[in-house]
Amino acid sequence: MVGPFDTARALRDAIMSRQMSAEDACRVALDRIERANGRLHAFHSVDGDRALARARALDAAGAITGPLHGIPIALKDNIAVTGAVTTAGSRILENYVSPFNATVVDKLERAGAVIVGKTICDEFAMGSSTENSAFGPSRNPWDTGRAPGGSSGGSAVAVASGMTPLALGSDTGGSIRQPAAFCGIVGIKPTYGRVSRYGLLAYASSLDQIGPFARSVADAALCLEVIGGQDSRDATAGSAPVPAFSEGLTGNMDGVRIGVPRHLLTDGVDSDVRTAFEAGVQTLERLGAKVIDIELPHARFAIPAYYLVATAEASSNLARYDGVRYGFRAADAGTLEEMYDRTRDRGFGAEVKRRIMLGTYVLSAGYYDAYYLKALQVRTLIRQDYQQAFERVDAVAVPTTPTPAFRLGERTEDPLQMYLADVFTVSAPLSGLPAISVPCGFTPEKLPVGLQLTGRAWDEMTLLRVADAFERATEWTKQHPPV
Amino acid sequence: MALTLGPDDARRIATLARIELTTDEVDLFARQLGDILNYVDELRALDTTGVEPTSHPLLAGPVWRADELVPSLDRDTLLQGAPGASPRVGLFKVPKVL
C-alpha cells in the first residue's frame, strides 16, 4: 500500500512493478493537496486535469519513460512551464502564461515526472518566509503559526506534508536549504552551473541555482541527477558530467573529514539548535567521520557581501519588468516614463522595491567602488577561506539556520533582522559551492533543525553520501508533521 | 559614523530605478535603506587592498554552443502575452512618446 509519505523511489518501484499506476500516484498527490492545501497553502496553482492526463499517457505508453516515471512533482512558481501561469510570487506576473519550458521541466518530463502544480514563493525569490509573496504565505506543517522558510517555502511544505514526494526550488542565499531545515526535509543547492537556469525567473544570476527538495537523501540524489547537466541555452551550465548520484550512496562515511567552524556558533545561535547540531556532529563522528575544528575568518562578512551582490544583480535583472512585453501594466499613465514608473510601483511588492533600490544605489556613480566592488572583493576572501578549509577537510558542517522556524509576522517589520538569519546559508552561493541541509533533530517544541554540509565545487557526491549515511543512522526524516 | 538617507535620496534612487514611490513609501524606504546601508558599512573595516573581485563563481568559464541558428519562439505567441500589442503589424504598443 502506498501512502503520502512514501519516497519517490518507493513510488517508482511500485509503479514499475505494476502494483500501482502513474494515475494512482497522481491521485494520491492530488487528494492530499485537496485536503491539506487550504490549511498549508503550499500551492499557488494546481493543474489536476493536466497532471492526470499526463499520468494516463505514461500508463498508456506501457514502457518505463525514465528514472522518475510517474512521480508527482511540485515546482516553485519561478520556474517556467509552457502554458502555465508563472508568477514568481509577484503581482507584476499575476496573469503571465509562459510560452516556454524551463530546461529542468523538459528534463523532468523526459524522465517521466508528472508536474502537479506551482508553489508559493517569496516574490522573485526575495525573502526567507514566503511572506513577501503577493499570494502567500505558506504555513509550516509542524506549526501552522510559523513560517515554512523561504523563499522556496511552498515547495518545502508540499514535500514535508506529503503532498508530493519531490519538489524543485531555487536557492540564491539559502532559499532551498533554509525552508528544508524549517520543514524537516532534505534540500540541496547544487554547485553553481550544475543545473541550467534557463527558464528560472532571474533574481541574482551569479548566485541562483535550481535544486530539489525530498523526504530522503536518495530521492534528492535521484532528482539532481535528472535535472543536472550542460545546456546549450545557458552558458553558465557547466560541461562537467553529472555523476549517477543515486548509485553512489554507499552508507559509508569512513574517513571523511568534516570541518566545524565553531567560532561561528555564537550567542546568536539558538541553544536548542546548537544542541541538535552538536548531537548531529557526534553522530557523524560515531559513523566514521573525522571531525576537525576549522576557521572561516571572513564568514562574518558574508551577509553584507551577499546583500550587496544580490541586490545589485537584482536591480539589473528586474529592469525587464516595465509593462511593455509581458505582465502587468498600469493603465492610467499618460507618458511612457509614467507607465514604467507606475507599473513598477504597483506591480512590485515592498521587499522587491527595497532590493531594487538598494542595488540601484550601490551600482550608482560615486558608490560603486565603496559598495559593489568592495563586496566582490570580500566574495573572493570568502571563497579563499573555503579553498583553504578544503585542503584539510572534505565538507564543512554548520547548523543550516541559527533558529528554528519563526512565527509568521514576527520579522516582517524589520527587513534587516530577516537578512541576519541567513548567516549560515549565504557563503555557499557566494563561493559557487554545493550545500545540503539534512534534518538533525527537533527542538523541545517539536520544530525541525537542519544540519548543513558544504562541499567542494562539483562534489555533491560527498555531501549526498555523508547525508545519506547520516539519515540511515537517524530517524529524523522518518518523522512527519501532524497534518 | 551613522549614515542617513533622507527622502530626497530615496526619491533620487527611485527615479534611477524607475519606480514611482508614494509619499509613505519614500519615508519608509529612506529609513529602511539607511539601516541596511549602515549595516553593510561594516565591510569597510576589512582591508581589501589588492584583492581581485569575484563577479561570478564560474569555475571553468562560460560554455558556448555552436553559433548556429536555432528555432525561437513564435512572434504571435509572444505578443499574446503583452499588455498592449498590435499582432497584425507585429508590434508592442506603449503610450505616445512624441
Image (spheres, coloured by chain):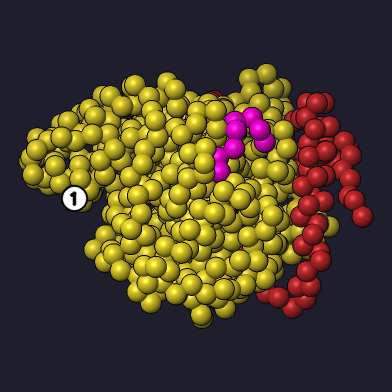
Q: Nearer the viewer, residue A181 or A66?
A: A181
Colour assigned to chain A in the rendering is yellow
Residue visible at 9% across and 38% down in the picture: A19
Q: Amino acid at mark 1?
A: Gly
Q: Residue farthest to the top?
A: A332
Point out residue A60 in the picture as x, y percentages from the top left corner.
9, 35
Residue visible at 51% across and 56% down in the picture: A277
Residue visible at 66% across and 47% down in the picture: A419
Q: Is residue A475 above or below residue A296?
A: above
Q: For this view, does B51 lie left or right of residue A403?
A: right
For the image shown, how many numbered marks are present on the structure? 1
Q: For this view, does A135 lie left or right of residue A460?
A: right
The C terminus of chain A sits in image quarter: top left
Colour assigned to chain B in the rendering is red
Q: Which residues are magenta?
A: A404-411
**Which residue is label 1 attached to?**
A66
For the question of whether residue A374 can be seen, the reply is yes
